[in-house]
Amino acid sequence: MTEKLPKKSTPPKLEMPRLLRLIIGTRFFSAIAVISSLAATLLMLLIGAQNTIKAFIIFLANNPETLTELEPGAEATLLLLESLDNFLVGLAFLYFAYGIYSLFIGLNQQNLPDNIPQWLKVSNIATLKKTLLEVIVVLLSVVYVKGLLENIATVGLKWEFLVLPISIVAIALSLKLMNLD
């Protein structure tokens, strides 16, 4: 005589409420931000490349009848600083697109390769904001140097030109305070 063992009862599957499924599904709306940021990245990189080519043309043509009062070398330098600014903005858009994708659409952080840089590991929105703030500090520094060179060449320096570096220092100090945790 064989005894039948009682069947193990499995706990009932909890069904996710429809509203919660709908809310979770809206994370794919962030794809609009990702696609737009990728398009902006491409545009900024093209603008930066265009400014670099213009700088070469201005410097190599050495045309004394340029539209500005600057000599060709100085004008080419300003264009190259502007292209650096464009490239940095493009890379900021690229990082933003990557961060939004990984946070909202679903890049599994545990499956990333070991050799990936730490700054590409976006674990939360605070990490994304912190890295973007660091890029903004660099961007503002490039803008300041470009403006400084333009003003020295044309109108000279005024005390009002200290507002931007003071702002850069304030943002950098706030970043430092964010790292104290």
Image: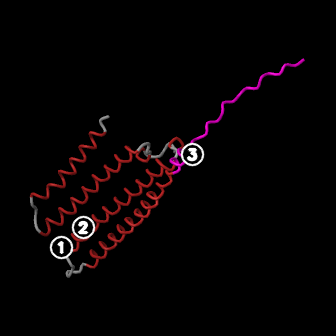
Q: Residues within 10 Å of mark 2 (few under 14, many from 20)?
A: many
Q: Residues within 10 Å of mark 1 (few under 14, many from 20)?
A: some
Of residues 156 and 106, the one nearer the viewer is: 106
Q: Residues within 10 Å of mark 3 (few under 14, many from 20)?
A: few
The amino acid on which the numbered mark 1 sits, given as a three-letter code, is Leu
Image depth: mark 3 or mark 1 in front = 3
x, y (%) of residue 27? Answer: 49, 50
Q: Looking at the image, is 25 positioned above or below residue 67?
A: above
Q: Are marks 2 and 3 in contact (CB under 8 Å)?
A: no
Of residues 129 and 82, the one nearer the viewer is: 129
Which residue corresponds to mark 1?
70
Residue sitting at x 43%, y 48%: 120
The amino acid on which the numbered mark 3 sits, given as a three-letter code, is Arg
Looking at the image, tell me whether mark 2 or mark 3 is earlier in sequence order: 3
Which residue corresponds to mark 3?
18
Left or right of 59 in this view: 152: left
Which residue corresponds to mark 2?
78
Of residues 91 and 63, the one nearer the viewer is: 91
Q: CA distance from mark 2 to mark 1?
A: 10 Å
x, y (%) of residue 41? Answer: 40, 62
x, y (%) of residue 85? Answer: 30, 61
Q: Quadrant of the C terminus?
A: top left
How many numbered markers are drawn?
3
Q: Quadrant of the N terminus?
A: top right
| Predominant secondary structure, magenta span | loop
Q: Are marks 2 and 1 in contact (CB under 8 Å)?
A: yes
Residue sitting at x 13%, y 65%: 152
Q: CA distance from mark 3 to mark 1?
A: 65 Å
Image depth: mark 2 or mark 3 in front = 3
The quarter holding residue 90 reads: bottom left
Residue numbers of the magenta segment: 1-25
